[in-house]
Image (cartoon, helix red, strand yellow):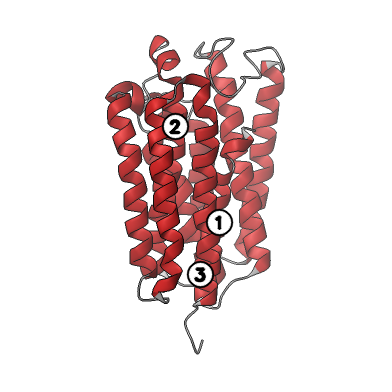
Amino acid sequence: MRLRTLPVSIAGVIAAAGCAAYYHKFQTGIFLVCLLFAVIAQIVSNFANEYFDFRKGLDKKGREGFRRGVTEGDISPKSMAAATFTLLGIDALIGLSMLQWGPWWLIFVGIAIAVFAIAYSAGPYPLSHHGLGDIAVIIFFGLVPVTFTTYLQTGSWQMIPVTIPVALAIGLMGANVLIVNNYRDADDDRQVNKRTSVVILGRKTMATVYFINGILALALIEVATIGRMPIIWQAAMLLYANLHYMLWVKLRYLKGAELNPVLGQTAMLMLGVAVWLVIALSCNAIPGL
């Protein structure tokens, strides 16, 4: 399941809860269903990554990072495939249950999420093998969960001035988690011609992208929140900036398995920002609604 990275899917839904609360529209039931849907979708993607990378010979025993259960013989390929598509089916049913709160066309959003969960690692043009994983993460762990979870709760698009910059910020922070993962695995990926963004552009360039992503995320959150709450609330983002800088320094100087804690810390920093957004936007909701 790659538990260290699950905060990536959790953060988007939590940030959306803050956006909905800002408009006095937070709904616990919708929030919990969206949270379950998002987490299972990420697990499906992780399982599919294990299975399809094994089938293509892209993983090897003793590889850096997460233990590859199929490659190491902990679980059979057949069992992993069954787990992947069973969970995908369960998640599809959870997604369909959301139609009680939203319009029929949300089915197409669900289909896109399901396709992405598998196409990240499989199909004729696997996104993670062609340097497109980072963009996919920004879309499916940022824009999609934040905007549509908020939409389901509010029933309108009036939240766009807050939601869009928050969604992009969350997406960029999610992309940073993937950058750390691919940064760690770059040598192994290069050997099997798995062309992640780090393999294509190099570690130095992607370390710079990691830093820029964090700064852009900070700026976008300021766009969404400045003027909507007293300036004292922004002190938390100063803490974020310092922690992001510290993680960037670690990224540049650590190697291999030493980067596993940085991966988890990057994901937890993203989750921490999402939790702050819930608190800050809830406590400074639009008056009079």
Residue 61 visible? The answer is yes
Of the numbered discs in the image, which one, if any, rests on residue 115? none
Kind of residue at badge 3 = Ala
Disc 3: CA contacts within 10 A as few (<14), some (14-19) or many (>=20):
many
Which residue is outermost to the bottom? 288
Q: Looking at the rendered structure, which numbered label has been put on residue 280?
A: 3
Residue tagged 1: 13
**Distance (Cα) linking label 2 and label 3:** 28 Å
Tag 2 residue: 180
SS class, disc 2 = helix
Does residue 252 lie above or below 168 as drawn? above
Helix or strand or loop: what does disc 1 sit on? helix
* Residue 173 or residue 137, whichever sits in front: 173
Residue 202 relative to residue 38: left or right: left
Q: Nearer the viewer, mark 1 or mark 2?
A: 2
Local SS, label 3: helix
Instruction: Please name the residue shown 56% across and 14% down the image.
Output: 55
Picture layout, residue 280 above or below residue 149: below
Q: CA distance from mark 3 to mark 1?
A: 15 Å
Front position in the image: 129 or 237: 237
Task: Give above or below for 174 relative to 22.
Answer: above
Give left or right: position of 67 versus 210: right
Quick one: label 1 or label 2, which is nearer the N terminus?
1
**Which quadrant: the N terminus?**
top right
Return the x and y of residue 92 as percentages of the image width and height.
63, 46
What is the x, y in percent for residue 164?
38, 61
Q: Residue at x 37, y 53 (%)?
A: 217
Amino acid, disc 1: Val
Q: Quadrant of residue 220?
A: bottom left
Query: Is tag 2's residue or tag 3's residue first in the polypeptide sequence?
Result: 2
Circle nearer the viewer, 3 or 1 = 3
Vertical placement of residue 98 versus 66, above or below: below
